[in-house]
Image (spheres, grey):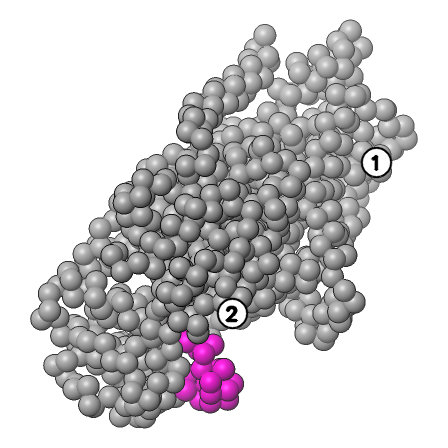
Amino acid sequence: MHRNKWIYSLASLMLAATLIFGACTPAAETTPKKQTLTVYSGRSEALVKPIIAEFSKSTGIKVQVRYAGTSEMAATILEEGKNSPADVFFAQDPGGLGAVESLLMPLPDSISNQVSPQFRSSNGTWVGISGRARVVVYNTQKLKESDLPDDIWDFTDPKWKGRIGWAPTNASFQAMVTAMRVLWGQEKTRQWLTGIQANNPKVYPNNTAQVNAVGAGEVDVAMPNHYYLYGILRDKGESFPARNYYPRGGGPGAVILVAGAGILETSQNKDAATRFLEFMLSRTR
Amino acid sequence: MGVVIGKTLSLIGRLGRAGQGTHIPRPPVIIWLPAVFIALGVLLPQAYLVLRALGAGGEIWELLFRTRTLAILGRTVALVIAVTAVSLAISLPLAWLTTRTDLPLRRVWSVLTALPLVIPSYVAGFTVVAALGPRGILQQLLAEPFGLERLPEIYGFPGALLTVTAVSYPYLLLALQAAFHGLDPCLEEASHSLGYGSWDTFRRITLPQLRPALAAGSLLVALYTLRDFGGVSLLRYETFTWAIYIQYQTSIDRMSAAALSLVLVALAVTILLIETRTQSRARYYRSTVGVVHLPTQRQLGRWRWPALGFCVSVVLLTLAMPMAILVYWTTSGMSAGESLRLAWGSALNSAYVSGLAAAITAVAALPIAILAVRYAGKSGRLPERVTYVGFALPGIVIALALVFFGANYATPIYQTLGILLFAYLILFLPQAVGSTRTSLLQISPHVEEAARSLGRSVRQTLITVTLPLVRPGVLAGAALVFLTTMKELPATLLLSPIGFKTLATSVWSATSESLFAQAAVPALLLIVLSSIPMALLVTRQPKEIS
C-alpha cells in the first residue's frame, strides 16, 4: 500500500499539471486566427514592444511577437518553410532578411517607395524600418563641436588619453567594427582598436551608461548610437550637458545600421501585415 | 594478512560478475517497448542533421578537413579533458567532505557547492568577464592599493575552463554525493577491521564502488562541455559549438552547421565508447544477509580548517562571485534610476514548465535505465547510450531540428508546450537516466527475483518493488532536469507558445540590449528559486552515526 502511494502521487501530480496546462492555454483561440498578426522579431523587446503596442491600439489588430536572435529566427523561418506561422519578419540587420528572401513576398510600391533604395532590398522583398546612426557624444561643458576630429580614427591621438568611453560588448559597436573592416581593412581596424586601447578608454556595459557618463563628466567623449541621448534629454531636460556629433568626414564612425522587415509569402494575413509595415514607416509614431 | 583480505574481497566481486554475465533474461514488453520508442524520439535531431548535411555539396568535405576545423577540434578536445579533470579534482573531495565527515556546516556546503549548476552559462560568462577581465572589477579593486594596470588575460582557455567547469562540475558532485550515500559501509569496515589504513581502504574498496557514479558524472560533464555555448563564446575560446553558432550567425548556413554538428556527434560517440569500456560487470549491491547501516562520520581533526578553506574557495569562485556581480548590477542600476520589476509571471512560467519537464523526463528515464541495468546485453544498453548522444549537441541544433519536424510533420503541436517539453526531454534525458541507473545498480536484483518467485507478475514487481527502491535516483534525476530546464534558452525561445516568457528568456532579452541591471534581477530570481529544489535534493540525506 505504502509503496503504491508514491506512484499515485506522481500520477496525480502529472494529472494536476495537465489540468493546469489546459486551464492556462489561452482560451483555445476562440477568436479566429486571422485577426492576430504574428511577428518574428530579431529586434529586441525593449526597443520594439512600445511601437507594436501603439500599432495595436491605433488599428485594433492584435499582434503576437516571438523574440529571438535575428539569425536564429531566420534559420527558424527557413526550417518552417511553407508552414511558417509568421506573417512578418522584423530583423536586426539586412543579413537575416537576405537569407529568407526567397520566402518573402514582393512588397507593394506604397511601402517600397517610402524608403530610399540603399536602405531596401533590390528585389523589393524587404525595407529598412529604422536606422541607427553611430555617433560621437561629447560633453558640451568641456568641448565644442569644432574641437572634435573629422573622423573617429583621430581618437587614437594620445591627446585623448583617459577621455574616451566605449561599450565594446555592444552589438552595434561590433557592427561598427565590421564596417571598419570593410571600409578600412583588417590592419587599419586593428590599429584603431589598439590605438584606442592605448588611450585607456573607460569601459561601459551599454549605450545608456556611456551617454550618462559623458553628461556626468566622467569622460569627454563616447561612441554610442544616436537615439540614446534623446531618451536621456527627455528625462533630465535640455540642460543635460551632452550632445551628438556626427563625424564630419563620415567613415565607419558615422555609419548607419539598418533594421528591416518583410512579409512572408505564406502569410494568411497579408493585409494586416502590409498595414503593419506601413505603420512602422509612417511619420505619426 | 592484508593481501588475504584484498584477495577475498576481489573474489567476492568476481563472483558477482560471473553470476550476472552468463544469462541475460529477455526484457518484458512494458520495459523494452517504451525504451525503444523514446530512444527513437531522441534520435530525431541526428536524423535532421544527416538530412541537412546531405543537402550540402562537396564543399562540406573541404570545410570539415580544413586545418582550421582540425584546430577547433583540438581545442574542443583539450577543453573537454581539462574541464572533466578539474571537475573530478574538485568534486571527489567535496563529495566526501560533505557526506562522510564532520565538516562544520556540512549540509550548507553540500547545497552551496551544488548550486552553480543553476547559473546559466551565459550569465556565468558575463560575470567572469566583468569580475576577472583585464579591466574588470578585480583590477579596479587592485588598481588603487597596488597600482595594477591590468590583469593577465582571462579570455581564451583559462576563462573558458573556469566558466564551463563552474557550471558543470556539480553534475559530478551530485552523482558522487548520491553514490556515497548509497554505499554500504560494511566493506569499508571489514577492510578497516582487518588492518587496512584509510588511504588503502579508500583506494581499494571505496573508489571502485564509486565507479558508476564517477563515470556517469564525468560523462555528463564532458558532454556538457561539448555543448556549452554561453561560456566559450563570452570568454572567446573557439570550440565546435561556437563554430556551429558562427555558421548560423554569420551566414545562416544550415548545411555547414549540420556537418559540424555531426562531428560533434562523432566526438560524443567516442567519449561514450571510452566510458563504456571503463564499465565493468561488477555489482554494486550487497548479496549477503545483513542490516544496511549508516557509515560513521570521519573526524577531520586539524584538517577541518583546510577542508573548510577548500569549500569556501570553491563557493567563492563559482557561486559568490557571479551572485555578487549580479547584485552589483542590480544596485548600480537602481541608483541610476532604472525601474526594476520582479518578473513573477516569468518565474511562474519557468517553475511550471520545468516541473512538467522534470516529471515527464524522470518517467521516461525509468524503462531505459531498467533495461540498461537488469537486461544489460549489448542491445539492452543501446537505448541508454543513445540518449547521451543528443546531450552533446548545442541547444540551437536540437531546437532547429524540432522546428523542422514540428512545423512540417507535427503542425498541431508546433510551438505549443507539447513540443517544448519534448525538446526538454531530448536535451535533459541523460541526467535522469544517469541517476536512475546509478541508483538501480545499488539494488540487488534478488529482491525482484524473490517477488517474482512469490507470484508477483512482472508489472506488479516493477510497481511494488523496483520503483519504490529506485525512488531516490528517480527524484534526484527529476530535480536535475528541473534545474537545467529552468535555465534553458534556445529551445525555449524558438519552440515555446508565442509570447511565453521564462526567467531565462527575460535574462536573455535584457542582456541582448546590454541592460545588465534589467538582466540581473531575473537572473538572481532564477538562482534563488532554483536553490529551493536543490536544497531539497541535497539535504534528503540519511543521518549519520557520529
Q: Nearer the viewer, residue B98 or A285?
A: A285
**What residue would you read off at disc 1?**
B379
The chief SS type of the magenta part is helix
Chain under numbered label 2: A
Q: Which residue is farthest front? A: A109
Q: Nearer the viewer, residue A90 or B544?
A: A90
Q: Amino acid at mark 2?
A: Ser
Relative height, residue A102 to residue A226 (above, below):
above
Determine the secondary structure under disc 1. helix
Q: Which residue is farthest left? A: A239
Q: Nearer the viewer, residue A11 or A276?
A: A276
Residue B184 visible (yes or no): no
Number of residues whose C-alpha sits closer than 10 Å to that of mark 2, classed few (under 14), some (14–19) or many (20 or more): few
Q: Find the magenta span and give its range.
A: A171-193
Q: Nearer the viewer, residue B412 or B420?
A: B412
| Residue B175: numbered disc | none
Relative height, residue B440 to residue B488 (above, below):
above
The x, y position of residue B488, in whole percent, is 50, 46
Residue at 74 percent across and 37 percent down: it is B40
- Labels 2 and 1 touching (C-beta < 8 A): no
The x, y position of residue A150, in whole percent, is 30, 90
User: Which mark lies nearer to you, 2 or 1?
Assistant: 2
Q: Which residue is farthest right? A: B22
Q: Amino acid at mark 1?
A: Ser
Quadrant where the N terminus of chain A is found in the figure: top right
| Residue A122: numbered disc | 2
Q: Is residue A87 left or right of residue B244?
A: left
Relative height, residue B311 to residue A124 (above, below):
above
Quadrant where the C terminus of chain A is found in the figure: bottom left
